[in-house]
Image: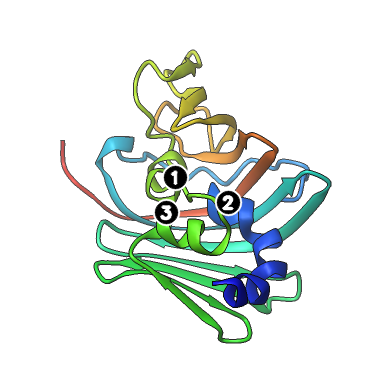
């Protein structure tokens, strides 16, 4: 409704890219501490990550800290400001998708794409992005490096670039991702990965 859009207009400008491509301020990259062997990307079933996200859309840019907890049945994304205050929470489960702002206002939809269209006027690619952040993208979708890891991919209309990994290992997870579509640019800097569950191969 018009009232809902007016209510969420400031947040929409802030979140359009974050929750679209979801999901950092350009900053110097420091290699992550060696995490040891990682499971194959396509076997990862659930994970948690902490990082920072920056979104630029047109002449506007916003930044936030990010915590994302993912499994096949549920996603929860917490966005917070520079002083740690919560800016928004997004959840996805079998009942649908929910956005809760810092002022506790709530918007619900059947799924994340519908939520984005209802609040922001743009479909969110978060269902696919849950896989993109692990660099699990279809073969043939773009370029790979000498270790066989994705460097660039075109997925669902988004240009995804993997600018850094946590180590030189073939199974290393991304630590810096950049996504583009139309006038939206999203940079995600991942500071900490935790793989909760993976299936055996």
- Which of pointers 1 and 3 lies earlier in the amino acid sequence? 3
> Pointer 2 and pointer 1: residues touching (CB < 8 Å)?
yes
> Pointer 1 and pointer 3: residues touching (CB < 8 Å)?
no
Q: Secondary structure at mark 1?
A: helix
Q: Residue at x 41, y 63 (%)?
A: 69
Real-space Cα separation, disc 1 to disc 3, in angstroms: 12 Å
What residue is disc 3 on? 113
Observer-side mark, 2 or 3, equals 3
Residue 53 on image: x %, y %: 65, 53
Q: Secondary structure at mark 2?
A: loop
User: 145 or 118: nearer the eye?
Assistant: 118
Q: Quadrant of residue 138?
A: top left
User: 52 or 201: nearer the eye?
Assistant: 52
- Which of pointers 2 and 3 lies earlier in the amino acid sequence? 2
Residue 28 on image: x %, y %: 78, 42
What residue is disc 1 on? 129
Real-space Cα separation, disc 2 to disc 1, in angstroms: 9 Å
Q: Secondary structure at mark 3?
A: helix
Q: Residue at x 59, y 38 (%)?
A: 177
What residue is disc 2 on? 23
Residue 170 is labelled as none
For mark 1, does the 10 Å Cα neighbourhood hold few (<14), some (14 to 19), or many (20 or more) residues?
many
Residue 29 on image: x %, y %: 71, 41
The quadrant of the rendering that contains the C terminus is top left
Please, is residue 44 above or below residue 144 in the view? below
Image-based side of 94 in relation to 29, left or right: left
Q: Residue at x 48, y 49 (%)?
A: 123
For mark 3, does the 10 Å Cα neighbourhood hold few (<14), some (14 to 19), or many (20 or more) residues?
some
Q: Quadrant of residue 184?
A: top right
Please, is residue 111 above or below residue 28 in the view? below
């Amino acid at each position: 409704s018009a009232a809902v859009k007016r209510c969420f207009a400031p947040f929409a400008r802030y979140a359009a890219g974050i929750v679209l491509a979801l999901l950092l301020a350009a900053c110097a990259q420091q290699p992550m501490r060696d995490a040891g062997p990682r499971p194959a990307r396509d076997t990862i079933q659930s994970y948690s990550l902490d990082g920072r996200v920056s979104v630029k859309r047109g002449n506007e840019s916003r930044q936030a800290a990010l915590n994302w907890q993912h499994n096949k049945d549920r996603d929860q994304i917490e966005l917070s400001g520079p002083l740690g205050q919560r800016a928004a929470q997004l959840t996805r489960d079998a009942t649908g998708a929910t956005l809760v702002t810092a002022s506790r206002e709530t918007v619900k939809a059947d799924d994340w794409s519908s939520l984005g269209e209802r609040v922001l006027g743009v479909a969110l690619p978060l269902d696919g992005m849950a896989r993109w952040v692990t660099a699990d993208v279809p073969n043939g979708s773009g370029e790979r490096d000498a270790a066989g890891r994705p460097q660039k991919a075109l997925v669902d209309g988004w240009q995804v670039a993997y600018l850094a990994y946590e180590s030189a290992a073939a199974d290393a997870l991304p630590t810096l991702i950049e996504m583009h579509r139309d006038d939206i640019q999203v940079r995600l800097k991942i500071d900490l990965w935790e793989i909760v569950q993976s299936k055996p191969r």
